[in-house]
Amino acid sequence: MTTIAVTGASGFCGSYVARAAAAQGAEVVCVGRRPGPVGRHVYWDAALGRAPDLGGAEAVVHCAAAVGDPVPGSPGEAAMRAVNVEGTAALLEAAAGRPLVWVSSASVYAPGPERARLREEHPVGAQLNAYGRTKAAGEALALSAGAVVLRPRAVYGVGDPHLAPRLLARVRRGLLLLPGRDVRLSLTAVENLADACLAAAGAGWPPGAYNIADPVPYSRDEAVRTVLAAHGVHARVGHLPAALARAAAAVVERAARRRPLGEPPLTRYAVEQLAHGVVLDVTRARRQGWTAQRTLADYARALEAGPRPGADRPPAD
């Protein structure tokens, strides 16, 4: 791997992939609307449906994505589809003949009760929000084109603009309410995802889908306490009946349909992500020689040792 193109390299996941590639000695081409943290910049807006210029790149890691939880049928959902589906089609046209790693999400898996050791053969479908639906549609295109598709779950790390800020925003008077009882969850450190991206691109993993997660699953409540404490927030974790949380989310979603330009503060997707245990089986990736090295404890130590994640990092590209 001499020259690697990383789409969305100014965003959270893409910036980690770009830096890790440069640290391994690769020449990095950062493809997106804004320059990445290293290497050469090639402008590309994934929402416009035009193929980017990947000239000189020997491998491609596609991290560019629209992330969020917009109201169904809203302009936000249409914009998400433009990036995650039409943008993927344009990228596949440009990347033809090159090794391609496409970063997907465990959100593509069909929801349900607690799922332990969820394998890549688990059904994909019935996603609860636009993000899951558009990522499933985009990865279907990528798989048909012979790409390696990585499915992390709840990617976190220093600079995370999504998970930690949402948790912190929901603390009220020293209390954070979570839906249902404590469960076991897989999480994915962004460093582990970056390592998998580069391993798959460099070693030529066989095309197909691969789950990517930390070495062991976590207790949901303990993981949340760890994140809060690492951010200097002292709060108690309480439990709200899951049925009540779902009912509240349904009410909020219905009200949000009257204001389709914003995202609902509470959704059924958010409830389900926290209410049901989901443990990813990463055997397939391990068989390719990949091993997750980072854990939530490493993240907490990194936060405590350095500045808090800045609000100036763009959430997506």
Image (cartoon, rainbow, N blue to C red):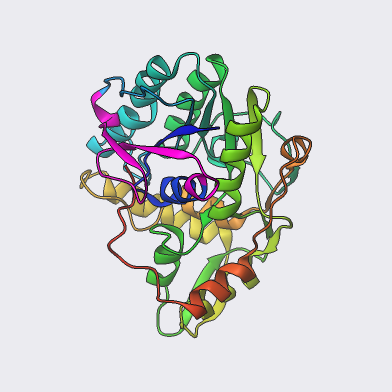
274 in relation to 200, above or below: below
Where's residue 131, x and y in %?
42, 38
Count of residue discs: 0
Instruction: State whether residue 16 appears in this view.
Output: yes
- Nearer the observer, 21 or 265: 21
Where's residue 110, x and y in %?
60, 35
Quadrant into which the C terminus falls: top left
Image position of 250 (left or right of 101)? left
**Residue 138 in magenta?**
no
Image position of 179 (left or right of 257)? right
193 in relation to 229, above or below: above
At a point 30% along the width and 30% down the height, the residue shown is 46
Instruction: State whether residue 64 appears in this view.
Output: no
At a point 46% along the width and 83% down the height, the residue shown is 232
139 in relation to 31, above or below: above
At a point 51% along the width and 58% down the height, the residue shown is 156
- Nearer the observer, 129 or 50: 50
- Write down the quadrant of residue 207 in the picture: top right
Where's residue 102, x and y in %?
51, 31
At a point 57% along the width and 75% down the height, the residue shown is 301
Where's residue 98, x and y in %?
50, 19
- Nearer the observer, 116 or 104: 104
> Which region of the structure is painted magenta?
21-48
Image position of 261 (left or right of 19)? left
- Nearer the observer, 254 or 99: 99
256 in relation to 63, above or below: below
**Residue 43 in magenta?**
yes
- Write down the quadrant of residue 218 in the picture: bottom right
Quadrant into which the N terminus falls: top right
